[in-house]
Image: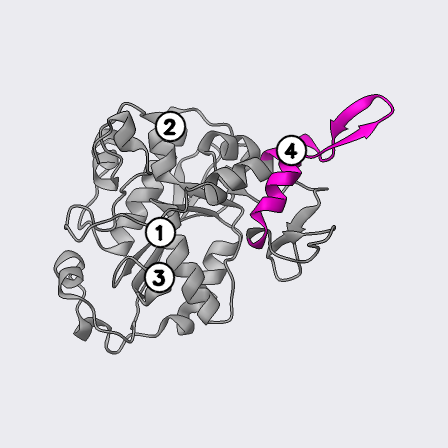
Amino acid sequence: MRWKHLPIVAFDTETTGLQPFAGDRIIEFAAVVLQLDDDGNTIEQSRHSWLVNPQIPIPRKVTEITGIADGDVAGAPRFYEIAPEVFDLLKDSIAVAHNFPFDMAFLSKELSDADLHWPEPLAEVDTVDVSMQSNPEARSHKLGDVCKRLGIVLEDAHRATNDAEACGRVFLELARRADVSDDLQQMLSWARAIGRPPEGSPIGPNDEGRVVFLDGKYEGQPVGEHPLHLAWMARARVRGPHGWTWRYSESTREWAQRWLAVRGAGRHRPNPKSFRSEDWVLDPCIAGERDRGIRT
């Protein structure tokens, strides 16, 4: 599959705080959809953004940082009203975000409350990870700093549409500099990103589009509910007449290992952002950077 011919949906959220499972809510969602030509140049762009009524007060610090106040969202839709549109935007896309786990956690919670699920995009690209791989010597991987390094303009940071567009531009520029081929699997490997399971795998989407186990004792259950079984699949062997062989194909094992590396082994970390304006909605990077001497 050729990824440059798929919609690239860079998205961002603004929220009342940092804890989606402790009552914080989305107050703004934005997505910028980029369509590319064969050479990877943007030929079409569309913006989608909503202010969202969180039904709880917006903290003063959040208003200072984002400019979004209670009065701005008083007449805005609640998230469940826009949830189907958000789901459709992401479901068959190359989904891109800066600090993907943070935004995904909020969206997954809000979508679940609207009786929907995470839409399992064709790819989930975190530009924090890509930046860290592309520029391991950099002192910061915050979105604003990454944009400066790449010569990308980021105006009015901390508003979802502007951050989303800048994130999409970062992804495309890093892919251009790395000369990533127009092959989805190669792009996923380069970005260390999660995509759909390979065809013929015992893991795949069900009728609702959720990635589930297709056989075995967890048949029909979402992969995310059984990461230990997924880890077993990545290492399982069987003994035959010619010795031990892998139980599952190389492509299945690689997918399982990448899923675990991104979601099951700490990448979906508790977000350590502070309420300092320079940190809000920008990347705090993953735990362990302090050990490597990288300052955030």
Circle 1 or circle 4, nearest the eye:
4
Question: Which residue in the protein does label 4 denote?
Answer: 235
Establish if 180 lies above or below 266.
above
Image side of residue 236 versus residue 24, left or right: right
Q: Which residues are magenta?
A: 225-254
Could you tell me residue 138's position as x and y percent?
A: 25, 26
Question: Which residue in the protein does label 1 denote?
Answer: 102
Which kind of residue does numbered mark 1 sit on? Phe
Q: Farthest residue in the right direction?
A: 241
Could you tell me residue 44's position as x and y percent?
A: 40, 47
Circle 2 or circle 3, nearest the eye:
3
Q: Dot 3: few (<14), some (14–19), or many (≥20) neighbours within 10 Å?
A: many
CB-based contact (under 8 Å), mark 2 and mark 3 = no
Question: Which residue in the protein does label 3 denote?
Answer: 20
Question: Which residue in the protein does label 2 denote?
Answer: 133
Question: Is residue 46 visible in the rendered structure shown here?
Answer: no
- Name the residue at 71% across, 45% down: 202
Question: Is residue 295 visible in the rendered structure shown here?
Answer: yes
